Image (tube, rainbow, N blue to C red):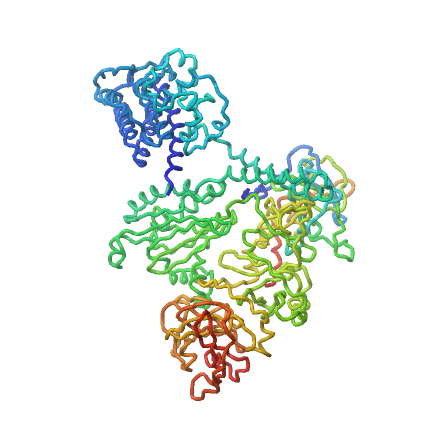
Amino acid sequence: MHPSPHASDTITPPPHTGVGRYAAFLVAGRKFVVPATDVAEVLRDGRVNKVPRAPESLAGLLNLRGRIVPVIDLRRRLGLPSTESASGRPTATVHLVLQATEEWSSLLVDEILDVIEIDAARFEPVVSQQQTDATDATTAVYASDDGLMYLLDIRQVLRPTTRPRPTTA
Amino acid sequence: MDNREFVQEFLVESSENLDQLDRDLVALEATPDDPDRLASIFRTVHTIKGTSGFFGFSKLGALAHSGEHLLGRLRDGTIRLNEEIAGTLLSMVDAVRAILRNIEETGDEGLSDFRELSDAIAAMSEGREPAPPSGMRPRSAGQSVAAPSPRAQDTPASEVKVERLAIPPKPSVEKSVPPPPAPAAATAPIEAPAEPASETASSVPPPPPTTVEANPNVAADSGGTSAKAPPSAAESSVRVDVGLLGSILDLVGELVLARNQLRLAAADIPQVQDAVRRVHAVTSSLQETAMKTRMQPIAQVFSRFPRVVRDLSVSCGKDVRLEIDGAETELDRTLIESIRDPLTHLVRNAVDHGIEPPSERVKLGKPSAGLLSLRAFHESGQVTVEVRDDGRGIPVDAIRRKAVARGLVDSATAERLSDDEVLQYIFEPGFSTAATVTDVSGRGVGMDVVKTNIEAIGGTVDVRSTPGKGTTIRVRIPLTLAIIPALIVKCGPQRLAIPQASVCELVPLARREGDASLSAAGERRGAVIEGLETAPVIRLRGELLPVVSLSKLLGLEPDDDPSAETLHHGGTVVRVEVDDHEFGVIVDDMQSAAGSTEAAGLTTIVVKPAGSLVAPIGLYAGATVMGDGGVTLILDLRGIARAADIPERLQRTHQADIPASPLGDVADATTGDSVLAPVVVCRSRHGRRVALPARKVSRLERFAEKAVEQTTDRSVVRHAGSFLPLVDLDDFLSGTTRPIGVGQVQAVVLNTSSGPIGLVVDEILDVAMPDTPPVSLDTVDDLQGTSWGARRWERRMVEVAGQAAELLDILGDTSTPITQALTT
């Protein structure tokens, strides 16, 4: 019952060699992939319960059959440009539920694309002049025929980087 | 302390050890020179000897001692194991079993003293051939442990069991649920009609060997696995994998959830109400029982400390007396595991750093033996474990210097920090002030780990230390982590759970400020939020309770007009107590509990971790899934208190229930004397009986000597960031100004128009309604020439409980603020 060190503390292993299956999805117009084995399920409509005073990247908590799963607003987490409506509600409504870590998590994404096969050798390191939230969380990039696909480091995404907003006393 | 539980534990443990001994001895016969096995056997017998000595079981001790002696010779290689010796040792094991069984059944060791066996063992230790006593034949390995040879003569208890095997089974429900502490009492009456009572057992002839041979397995296990035999301690308790218990508890948690869902869903279906109620009742009992399976006495941790302390005090050259209290206090097994290391660390610290060497203690006028006290007790749904020593205390100044040296704080700030605040630095990683690093502690690792470990299980560590007097460390841990009753509150769009263990009461708030004045006199109205915007309070039975607006704290409402919000906030104040904080949480409403048999808003929740992303926010203790499937966060009240800057409650010894004035402050400005209003009656240090209007009293408080700060002509205590002037009541009445003197003081804190003032009294006598309306004597007005400046009050007398008292009512229109003279 008490907190155990999460698997998220371990360093993400480099992509496996050989051809692997990856789930591709769209966030703010960009394509990302995660290993297909990390995906637990895809949820089209989940009731997200907000957590007051949470970092803005945490959209809330989701009840997944009795399991409490944090929901990450991936667009905010990666600091990607806003495509949201004026209401301030995230437009992304698809839950990509991941079982990559001991503590499950759900990523709010715009659209699930497909499961694709990528040869690990074709991933290239992300080169960037500037360290950003987005580059921190992407370990590699794959140039596919229809654009770049970034390999998302889930453990890095789940690592709390943004400090919680200060509470007013 | 209840010895019986420990005896019971000893019995269970020994029974397991004896089985192991059987196996080891038999195996040893095959490889007589196996030193490891021999050492293991030796240790086991030694343990039995030691424990029996501890409980005063002399026969058992003597028997184990003789066995140990023989085993010692074997270990030394003085003599070599042969069949005879092995047989004798196995007989000893059987005899030990018999005694244990007797202890379990009757509470004492029984009549048989196994002299023949002891003699035989002694003879073998000396290498002599024992004269085989009648009925005791050395057994060979080939006969295996099934041979019951010595029992026929020596162990009446075993014999009874064997005898019972021959009796046809008779139905008995009671037997299947034996109360372990007193099995003899419980089973005797059941057996009486069919079988001669066990007292007569010794006269029963030895059973025909065939009976035993026919049931070798039963005989081998002296406990007897037969359903007929009264179960031994080992049988009535079962070892269960902790993981299994955990999953049972998880499943029960799911069941509780489903039950709650069912209750919601079935609320409108009258036909299923009975079944729902039954499911509810059964689930509740199941849950309670499941929780109990995980409860264990803290003795499991405490029991190792006598040894730890002994060894430590020897190696540190200290003389330490250990006192243990409350070892029977139960808490969740997983928690017991989690506090084992932190507590050991605290104990080590106390012996190594806290308690001075005997010579130093004598010089200081302390008893040469230091006192280390370990105490565990339940306190409002939590378990408190206290580690207290009367040693040198923690050198606050050294910590202050060290904190500055390590750059944790700048020196100017460090000087302003209170001792308690400075003490917090010992929880910083790598912080140690120990002059010497010893084997035991002082390497600067520890207190931070202690704190981290305790906080990981939702607990707190609190340190108090007085230089020269000692240190007290209080570890507070939740009783259990899994399933708790909670109050579900609503706040804006949010639903939140408050652990019920911390909830004291619910106080309705007046809807609007206007409502309060509109309500008829005497009618009970809601509380009103008063005080500063940054530190709102409500008045509750004459005391001020700091309150926190949850919607504001959680950012659920826009902050643009805070004053309007706090003043016109309807809803409810949930008064909570956690650690040394007592405060109110303002919420909109209680969750309505549809179909619930419990009070509105109260429900049982299954605590789940909210996850690594929510924990750092510091306001939530976890989350739970509600009956409707939504996720509800559980408030961490400590975190709330921290975030809202709730001052720590000062020591309050006088928890007087001051009856609320029906008119409150509304009456104050206008009437004031025509109505009976409750008063606080106290005795001044010079013996005057003085009554103070309860509505003016904000609290009754006792201040420790060190809390009172003296200047040349006055005394103050620092309270919640400001100074509270303390004035002796006699001095106040006579208009003198001087410090109140030293020592602990009892004060009545009054709210006056110019701020609070603490009147120091000798004793609080009563809080009551006067018998008569006050009788006016004269008006004391404008006493010139005193350092108080202008004062004005009416001198009136009231009668309370048949005795007259002077009514001191400081009027609101005092021209010069009373406290101005003190605080400026």
Picture coordinates of residue B25, whole percent (x, y)? 35, 21
In the rendered image, the vertical position of residue B708 relative to residue B390, given as above or below: below
Furthest residue in direction bottom, as rendered = B784
Furthest residue in direction top, as rendered = B210
Q: Name the one closer to the observer, B34 or A139.
A: B34
**Residue drawn 38% across and 29% down?**
B105
Picture coordinates of residue B677, whole percent (x, y)? 54, 72
Q: Is residue B752 visible?
A: yes
Picture coordinates of residue A165, whole percent (x, y)? 62, 58
**Residue drawn 56% across and 74% down?**
B675
Which of the 4 image quarters holds residue B762? Answer: bottom left
Q: Name the one closer to the observer, B606 or A48.
A: B606
Q: Is residue A32 visible?
A: no
Q: Is residue A3 left or right of residue B65?
A: right
In the rendered image, the vertical position of residue B56 relative to residue B674, given as above or below: above
In the rendered image, the vertical position of residue B363 relative to residue A11, given as above or below: below
Which of the 4 image quarters holds residue A106? Answer: top right
Q: Is residue B203 left or right of residue B642?
A: left
